[in-house]
Image: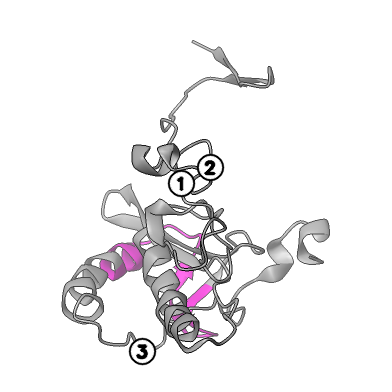
């Protein structure tokens, strides 16, 4: 059976199998606060500093923001690395640093004890390569493998015993690293951005 998807702007997309995610929305209190949120209830922030566009003493991270990233846990983690120093700068009367580049990475379980891993930011869409170390990985980006599944299982332990207690995670940078990425896999017009 085939169907067609009609978007809000009347574009039509044919499909044989549709797997969709409902529209995400932010908090109703944000949506009701004049100037704080966008039409979907996400806090409007500067995407590099995470400072609210409505008030200089308001910051937001993670699912609360309108930044053009996924709603993955790594986003909140990487944003936190920008947020804390920027709050300190604000309190000291110093200029904020536009440090968050949209870095996101996550495992995507594909079944049968295999997973994909993706790593991207505001400017670079997911591309093949290795992660976290250039040339050695050991995890392959955009390639389904058992090793990526095992990496995801290992990350669960790292999440509870390293990230939540606030310990640094060696080898993983807040900023997306280009080393190890096959940037030539991008469409030619996208790789020149």
Pick the front one: 146 or 109: 109
Magenta stretch contains residue 59: no
Residue 184 in the image, given as x and y percentages of width and height: 73, 68
The disc placed on residue 42 is 1
Would residue 173 be seen by someone viewing this image from the given angle?
no
The answer to whether marks 1 and 2 mark residues whose Cβ atoms lie closer than 8 Å is yes
Closer to the N terminus: mark 3 or mark 2?
A: 2
The disc placed on residue 111 is none
The answer to whether marks 3 and 2 mark residues whose Cβ atoms lie closer than 8 Å is no
**Quadrant location of the C terminus?**
bottom right
**Residue 46 placement: quadrant:** bottom right
Residue 91 in the image, given as x and y percentages of width and height: 44, 83
**Residue 23 placement: quadrant:** top left
Cα–Cα span, label 3 and label 2: 36 Å
Cα–Cα span, label 1 and label 2: 6 Å
Q: Which residues are magenta?
A: 130-151
Residue that carries the numbered disc 3 in the rendered image: 170
Residue 121 in the image, given as x and y percentages of width and height: 57, 65
Name the residue located 77 percent from the left edge and 59 percent from the top edge.
190
The disc placed on residue 38 is 2
State the SS at label 3: loop
Closer to the N terminus: mark 3 or mark 1?
A: 1
The answer to whether marks 3 and 1 mark residues whose Cβ atoms lie closer than 8 Å is no
């Amino acid at each position: 059976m085939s169907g067609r998807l009609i978007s809000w702007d009347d574009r039509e997309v044919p499909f044989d199998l549709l797997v969709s995610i409902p529209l995400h929305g932010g908090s109703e209190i944000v949506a009701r606060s004049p100037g704080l949120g966008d039409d979907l209830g996400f806090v409007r922030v500067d995407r590099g500093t995470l400072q609210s566009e409505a008030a200089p003493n308001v910051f937001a991270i993670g699912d609360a923001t309108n930044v053009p990233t996924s709603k993955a846990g790594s986003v909140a983690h990487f944003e936190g690395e920008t947020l804390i120093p920027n709050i300190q700068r604000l309190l000291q009367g110093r200029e904020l640093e536009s440090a968050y580049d949209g870095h996101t990475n996550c495992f995507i379980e594909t079944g049968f004890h295999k997973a994909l891993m993706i790593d991207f930011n505001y400017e670079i869409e997911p591309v093949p390569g290795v992660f976290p170390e250039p040339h050695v990985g050991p995890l392959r980006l955009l390639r389904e493998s058992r090793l990526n599944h095992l990496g995801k299982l290992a990350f669960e332990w790292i999440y509870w015993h390293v990230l939540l207690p606030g310990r640094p995670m060696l080898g993983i940078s807040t900023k997306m690293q280009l080393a190890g990425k096959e940037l030539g896999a991008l469409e030619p017009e996208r790789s020149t951005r």
